[in-house]
Amino acid sequence: MAKKFFSLPRIVQIILLIIPIVGWIVELIVRWSAVFEKFTILNLIAALLYTFLGWGIILQIVDIIWILLFKHLFLTKA
């Protein structure tokens, strides 16, 4: 799922992350699928962090900026 999300155009990724509840759900799905596809400690820490603290708007803003700059979510590579 993470690879599919990262293959979407960046504008679609940003739109999915801007919508408040949808953005949090998309982040959770992408982050946990990245953990299962390519297990690293960094992916696991990011998934746990966003599971418990990711509902805040600040982390979503960080992810939107990170996608614009680096084409993947903060602390997540698939």
Image: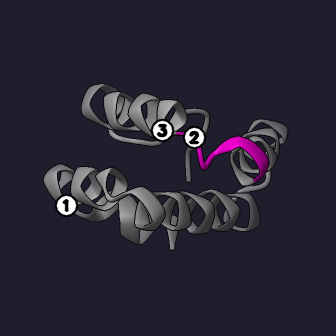
Magenta span = 52-56
Q: Position of residue 78 (x, y in %)?
A: 56, 54
The residue type indicated by label 1 comes to Val
At x 54%, y 67%, the residue is 25
Q: Which numbered dot is residue 57?
A: 3
SS at circle 3? helix
Give the CA separation, mark 1 to mark 3.
Answer: 18 Å
Q: Are marks 3 and 2 in contact (CB under 8 Å)?
A: yes
Disc 1 packing (10 Å; few <14; some 14–19; many ≥20): few
At x 40%, y 32%, the residue is 61
From the image, tell me which residue sits under label 2. Answer: 56
Return the disc, 1 or 3, that comes first in the chain's sequence: 1
Q: Is the stretch drawn in magenta largely helix, strand or loop? A: loop
Tell me if 12 is positioned left or right of 35 in this view. left
From the image, tell me which residue sits under label 1. Answer: 12
Q: Position of residue 32 (x, y in %)?
A: 69, 63
SS at circle 1? helix
Return the disc, 2 or 1, that comes first in the chain's sequence: 1
